[in-house]
Image (cartoon, grey):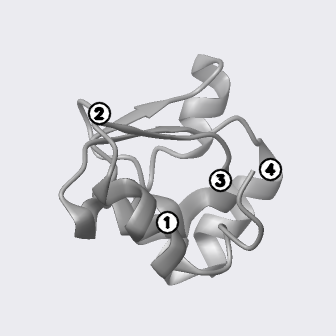
Amino acid sequence: VVPRLFEDATLAHALAREADVVVANTILAMRVVHAARAAGTPCLWWVHEAAFGRDLAATTRHTAAAFDAADALVFPSQAQAALYAPWAPAGR
């Protein structure tokens, strides 16, 4: 566990540079996704939140942009994937 990881992208960037792949496990890891992209490390983003996450993507530009920064997206159901369709690129 790395304190402040979700708040400080520089911490995430340093860790991502040392990894082969980053698995981000919540919508709140949007900075980690951006840091992995900046580090050139592939990133799988597992987004499991429903309405809360959709609302965050709709109101926060850096959250919405993280969907383009992730190399792969995983949702626990088709219904939840449909919530993020406006931001999730096809094929990811």
> For mark 2, what is the residue?
92
Estimate the spatial distance between the alpha carbons at disc 1 and disc 3, rounded to whole Å. 15 Å
| Crowd class of label 3 (few under 14; some 14 to 19; many from 20; radius 10 Å) | many
- Disc 2 or 1, which lies upstream in sequence? 1
Q: Nearer the viewer, mark 4 or mark 3?
A: 3
- Which element carries disc 2, helix, strand or loop? loop
Q: Are marks 4 and 3 in contact (CB under 8 Å)?
A: no
Image x and y of residue 57, in percent: 60, 66
> For mark 4, what is the residue?
51
Q: Are marks 2 and 4 in contact (CB under 8 Å)?
A: no
In this view, the residue in front, 84 or 10, is 10
Q: Nearer the viewer, mark 2 or mark 3?
A: 3
Can you see residue 34? no
Image x and y of residue 40, in percent: 18, 58
- Mark seen at residue 27: 3
> For mark 1, what is the residue?
12
Q: Nearer the viewer, mark 1 or mark 3?
A: 1
Estimate the spatial distance between the alpha carbons at disc 1 and disc 4, rounded to whole Å. 26 Å
Seen at 65% across and 24% down, the residue is 79
| Amino acid under disc 1 | Ala
Q: Is residue 86 left or right of residue 26?
A: left
- Disc 1 or 4, which lies upstream in sequence? 1
When the figure is inspected, residue 27 is found, relative to residue 23, above or below; the finding is below
| Amino acid under disc 4 | Ala
